Amino acid sequence: MLSRLWCDAVAGDSALLAFDPKILASLGAVLGVFGGAIGSSIGIGKAASAALPVVSEDPASFKQVVILAAMPLTQTFYGFIFALLSLTNVLPTIDNMTWFKATAIFGVGLFVMVAELFSAWYQGIICMSGILELPKAGGRMLTPSMILASYVEMLGILGLVLGYLLAIVISGLPI
């Protein structure tokens, strides 16, 4: 059914043409926010659930626990930055938004969504492990945990940057 609608839209025989392709591109631009928010929620939930028993055992570790538990939140910001840049800098520059460009930008948004979702999710798992090791290591696990979590953080940053660059390239294509 969906493929038939798409074929009709490409051929110009569908009510789908009344649906502006800029709406599809805009939806793609905000997908990164959803991926970041979902992944951050999962990641923070994992890290915070490990934090409660650690803080009850060693209340002095609260500051370190808060730092590690909050790290997966940044991917939501990356998704928001991608949406903001796409909606204010990329989409307004496209004079003739075709369905091909709109679909391509939607696909880039899906990529950013997946990058931010999994980056935050797995960063939460790494931070959870670091939090669980704090009492055993006498609090010396904060720096190593943050360094290890920053590797996954880089994937979220790369998702943002690559998504933005792809959106810019797509906006300039003569298609």
Image (cartoon, rainbow, N blue to C red):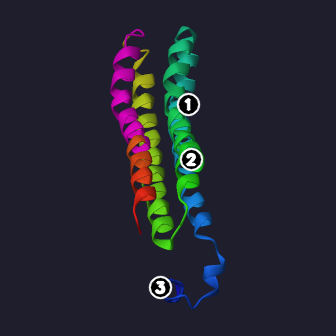
Check contact, mark 1 vs mark 3: CB within 8 A.
no
User: Dividing the image into 4 quarters, which one contains the C terminus?
Assistant: bottom left
Residue 4 at x, y = what percent?
50, 89
**Residue that mark 3 sits on:** 3
Range of the magenta residues? 138-160
Please report the residue visible at 54 percent of the width from the left and 27 percent of the height from the top: 70
Q: Is residue 112 left or right of residue 93?
A: left
Dominant SS of magenta comes to helix
> Comparing marks 2 and 3, which lies closer to the viewer?
2
Q: Amino acid at mark 1?
A: Ala
Residue 149 at x, y = what percent?
38, 29
Which residue occupies the foreground of this view, 135 or 102? 102
> Comparing marks 1 and 2, which lies closer to the viewer?
2
Q: Amino acid at mark 3?
A: Ser
**Residue that mark 2 sits on:** 83
Q: Secondary structure at mark 2?
A: helix
Q: Which callout, 1 or 3, points at the residue further toward the start of the chain?
A: 3
Q: For residue 136, say whether it is visible.
A: no
Q: Secondary structure at mark 1?
A: helix
Residue 121 at x, y = what percent?
46, 42
